[in-house]
Amino acid sequence: MSIHIGATQGQIASTVLLPGDPLRAKYIAETFLHDVVCFNEVRGMWGYTGRYGDKTVSTMGSGMGMPTLSIYVNELVTEYNVETLIRVGTCGAFQPDLKIGDVVLAMTASTDSHVNKLRFDGKDYAPAASFDLLLKAYNVAIDRGINVQVGGIFSGDTFYNDDPDWWKIWSEYGALVVEMESNGLYTLGAKFKISTLSILTVSDSLVTGEASTAEQREKGFAQMAEIALEIAA
Ligand code: HPA
């Protein structure tokens, strides 16, 4: 047991899929895995390990935002020897050619978080995805005919912003989408020398104001989970 995860040693696989929402972890376990064991109930942050074909894979909620995700990532790596973390989450589009349901693979993530400013003494750090995971995910998406884009994204510390135009500067500089976790995930991946990738589905657009329906969200989520399971070691 670690401070925030109730699993015993050996209960968590070396690859963990991390949706923000713990109920999405439950959905992945129930929909795609067999021989499933629930390893965490602490704070309702459900975690499961099961079999996908001949692979053993785990999935657990990360919560929303970098502070919460970082707690789980630290404990998964340092207490349970996890070696690959794949975020599966939703994002808001910054670019007009990104449509609801499109998949984005985050190559890097800019941020307004000050965590890395503190860590790097005021200097900027550019955290990056693991290229082997990114390439595999890209190839799976292309093989399946999924609309996929690869590029830099923005991981924000606030979901609700006072300035309605806050996102435009990031859009102008080519960031594809906004979410709230990948910068933290990739930074800790580098620190711990493990593999990390964020696979994201567009759930809303800051350009058009469009948002996905519950049905679109479920379909998009299943598609993303399947890409992540295919590339799991
Ligand atoms: N902002 C932040 N995170 C998000 C968004 C958004 O618009 N959409 C999905 N995750």
Image: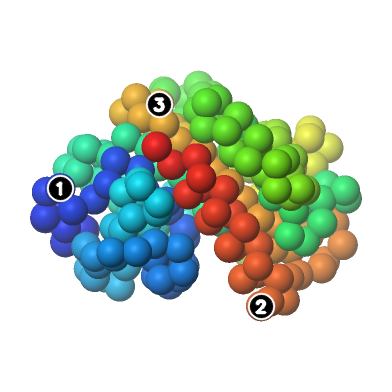
Label 3 lies in ligand 1 vicinity (Cβ under 8 Å) = no
Name the residue tied to disc 1: 10
Which dot marks residue 214?
2
Query: Going from the N terminus, do you reach mark 2 or mark 3 first?
Result: 3
Q: How many marks?
A: 3
Decide: few, some or many residues near mark 1? Use Cα within 10 Å; few <14, some 14-19, many ≥20. few
- Residue 104: x %, y % from top left: 68, 45
Q: Is residue 105 left or right of residue 45?
A: right
The residue at 35%/47% (across/down) is 54
Query: Going from the N terminus, do you reach mark 2 or mark 1 first?
Result: 1
Name the residue tied to disc 3: 190
The residue at 59%/54% (across/down) is 224
Residue type pointed to by label 2: Ala
Label 2 lies in ligand 1 vicinity (Cβ under 8 Å) = no
Give the spatial CA distance, label 2 vs label 3. Answer: 35 Å
Question: Foreground residue, 199 or 188?
Answer: 199
> Relative to residue 3, is residue 191 depicted above or below?
above
Residue type pointed to by label 3: Ala
Give the spatial CA distance, label 2 vs label 1. Answer: 36 Å
